[in-house]
Image (cartoon, rainbow, N blue to C red):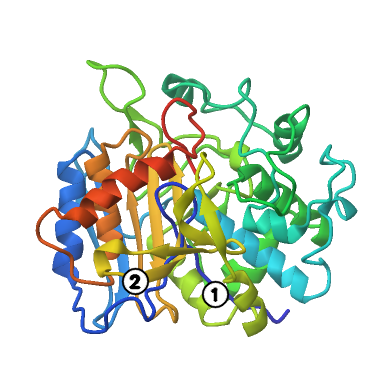
Amino acid sequence: MRHAVRFAATVITCAVIATVAPGVPSAAAPGQADVRTAMDKAVETGTPGVLAAVVDRTGRWSAASGVGELHTGREPRQRGRFRIASVSKTFTATLVLQLVEEGKIGLDDPVAGYLPGLLPYPEPITVRQLLRHTSGLPRDLPPELGWQSLPEVDTERFVSLTPEKVVRSATTGTPLRFEPGTSWAYSNIGYTVLAMLVEKTTRQPIEEVLADRILRPLRLSDTTLVRDQPLLTRAAGHGYEQLYQPPRGLTDVTVYNYSRYFGSGSMISTAQDVNRFFRALLRGRLLSADTLAQMKRTVPALDGNGEYAGFDYGLGLARLPLPPCGEGAFVWGHDGSLPGFGTYSLHDESASTQITTMGTRNLTAPIDSLVARFQVAAAAFCELETTTTSRTTQLATTLPRLLALGPVSSRRSAL
């Protein structure tokens, strides 16, 4: 098969991608010092550990700050594996688009033609609408199966759900949020449907399809799609959340069954592998130029109130503005958000400058720490201000609105 390999990204709330093209000032001179300073700030304000892998004009380098395990005090493994959460969506979307190129799937075909009887709605929902989050499908599982409180994130860690169970539980008796194609609303359920579509079309488990088409050609040896295995081997660091009231401390949420996010957020990788994937994607090794252009054709992302969420979304890829880098600066990529793991994977238009960064506290991380982690990602593309400014304040007020799109209804959400 013709397709080679590509790469993925992340933002704090939904999936967001970056590509500092004309918007990022060419005169900017970002460097390791800014990235490391922002990483230290994220740790100082409440994230146990942070790591980053960067590709820039100086070469490829990585860094870590804080601790990877609270009980040992070891620092995060810079080449360790972690849960990339919704960055998984870019991988899933790439597989779907490869099958579109091969004529096995029609981008504007109703998905019911491939998976008859799966969705209970009479309205036709197309493959393109699923990829772009304009399908109107529910975001996540219904209350009886979803996380309704932070302690439930702890107590439900070994719940195993099949993809069909996830989709049917989320959609049975639940109306569409809007007529397909008329609005935008983030949907993890939609990407589980897309993973099922890949399996139905290829007659193979998606793990094998992913390995054949992307992982082996790109030599992403530390990347896997996990179906229901709760363990995280060769971990970059343990993930933690404040799931209970003090004086109880942080809860380790590293071991977790994320079958509920099959196809939408269940992959494990390293920062280096993710950068390699996005570099292949953005440079045309995985998709044709025409298909990549369609992938990057975006619509405005909306928050839970139907207001502009501050970024735009294509077919499994996000276009994310970088306020710290100046007016009009943006990048391509995606973010990922799960208990204990928050990821940004951001890339300029040609993937000449890239960063994938991960922090080991997410749903309950203080806002200052979340802002600092965004600045870690932005620092790969431009020189940051040394003092708190209106741009930093803007991030501190914008990010919570984006995070409100998540799975813990009473707190924040995972992508």
Relative to 180, 188 lies left or right: left
Residue 303 appears in the rendering: yes
Mark 2 surroundings within 10 Å by alpha-carbon count, few (fewer than 14), some (14 through 19), many (20 or more): many
Q: Label 1, on which residue? A: 281
Foreground disc of the pair 2, 1: 2
**Residue 402, numbered circle:** none
Kindly identify the residue that appears in the image at 27 percent across and 40 percent down: 367
Give the CA separation, mark 2 to mark 1.
21 Å
Residue 62 appears in the rendering: no
Kindly identify the residue that appears in the image at 86 percent across and 50 percent down: 112
Q: Please state the horizontal and vertical placement of residue 355, each as a whole percent of the image.
A: 34, 66
First along the sequence among labels 2 and 1: 1
The kind of residue tagged 2 is: Ala
Quarter of the view holding residue 272:
bottom left
Kindly identify the residue that appears in the image at 53 percent across and 24 percent down: 156
Query: Quick one: quadrant of the N terminus?
Result: bottom right
**Residue 329, numbered circle:** 2
Q: Is 273 in front, or is 21?
A: 21
- Relative vertical location of residue 91 with respect to residue 292 in this rendering, above or below: above
Relative to 101, 391 lies left or right: left
Relative to 233, 375 lies left or right: left
Mark 1 surroundings within 10 Å by alpha-carbon count, few (fewer than 14), some (14 through 19), many (20 or more): many
- Relative vertical location of residue 12 with respect to residue 304 in this rendering, above or below: below
- Indicate the secondary structure of the residue bearing disc 2: loop
Q: Please state the horizontal and vertical placement of residue 254, each as a whole percent of the image.
A: 41, 37
Quarter of the view holding residue 144:
top right
Q: Please state the horizontal and vertical placement of residue 95, each as a whole percent of the image.
A: 67, 65
The kind of residue tagged 1 is: Leu
Q: Please state the horizontal and vertical placement of residue 19, each as a whole percent of the image.
A: 41, 72
